[in-house]
Image (cartoon, rainbow, N blue to C red):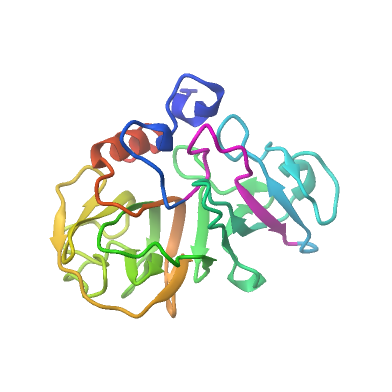
Amino acid sequence: MLINPYRYAAAGGVTLLLDETGLGSATAAYSVRQLRAAYSGDCMRVRRSSDSEEADVEFLSGVISINSPINNLSGGSGSTLTAWLGSDVAFVVTWFDQSGNARDATQSTAGSQPQIASSGALIVDAGGNPQILFASDQLEFTATGISGTAYTGYVVMDLISNSGYSIAVFADKFNIYSSLYSGNWGTYHGIDKASGYTALAHTLTINQSRSAADWDLISNNNAPLNGTLGGYATQPGRIGGAGIQYLNGYMQEVVLWANSSAPVATIQSNINSFYSLY
């Protein structure tokens, strides 16, 4: 089996994404992998289906694993996720923010929690990387103070289906991302849909402002598509949907910066080295 060195970055030898030169401090950062060496917290808190007990899941060699150590159990026993979970389904209660800004994305309603494991096994992509299933589910985070006209953000997602607006990430007054919808430019803050991209694909989607009324949308390593900003009411930060517009697909990583200078090429190189998207 080929070993991807980026998957085991925390063990040494590979630069973690937020430690890359020029990226600066992120405003919010969520991932199934460790994103910076200085982050010593857990990846996520999960709930098991049989009795709704919860546990915090740690990274194992830089990525969440079915063999990851667990801590802060509300009930049950076991020192690893697999021992504690058994053959249950695991739902994400909290996706911890790795930026250091304590913007943890959480969902207290059981029926709206996305899924990370099924029948005792992590949900993974074609390359074996863990991913979170969002099916009309959403996690909320504090978006206050992160709006502005200078912005960079990205999401790694894999769509199952796409109908209308399928929002992946929403932060304050900015619809940072939606699915790669086949249609015209949207009119919300940020580019929410664009013609010219494959709708159902495993993608790194980057949204970056160029001015107060000019944004680029970049999918994988394709040329940027440009759009114009419009207005939208203030909203709480959400991952997986906003209002009645939800993502139907998988997400692995979401990072936001309150600037428009984060180097796109650096983000693309690091992400593709880990997830092998293109």
- Give the vertical position of 219 relative to 215 (above or below): above
The reply to whether residue 278 is visible in this rendering is no
Q: Is residue 139 above or below residue 243?
A: above
The answer to whether any part of residue 154 appears in the image is yes
Question: Residue visible at 40% across and 38% down?
Answer: 275
Where residue 99 appears, as percent x and y from the top left, is 49, 47
In the picture, residue 114 is in which quadrant? bottom right
Instruction: Classify 73 as above or below 10.
Output: below
Residue 111: where, in percent of width, then height? 63, 72
Q: Furthest-front residue in view?
A: 145
* Nearest the eye: 55 or 277: 55
Q: Which residues are magenta?
A: 29-49
Q: Residue drawn at (35%, 34%), measured in percent from left and top?
A: 270
Nearer to the camera, 232 or 102: 102
Asked whether, in this view, residue 241 is left or right of residue 216, the answer is right
Q: Nearer the viewer, residue 222 or 95?
A: 95
Magenta stretch encompasses residue 45: yes
Percent x, y for residue 173? 34, 72
- Left or right: 74 as drawn, with respect to 249: right
Query: Does residue 179 show up magenta in the picture?
Result: no
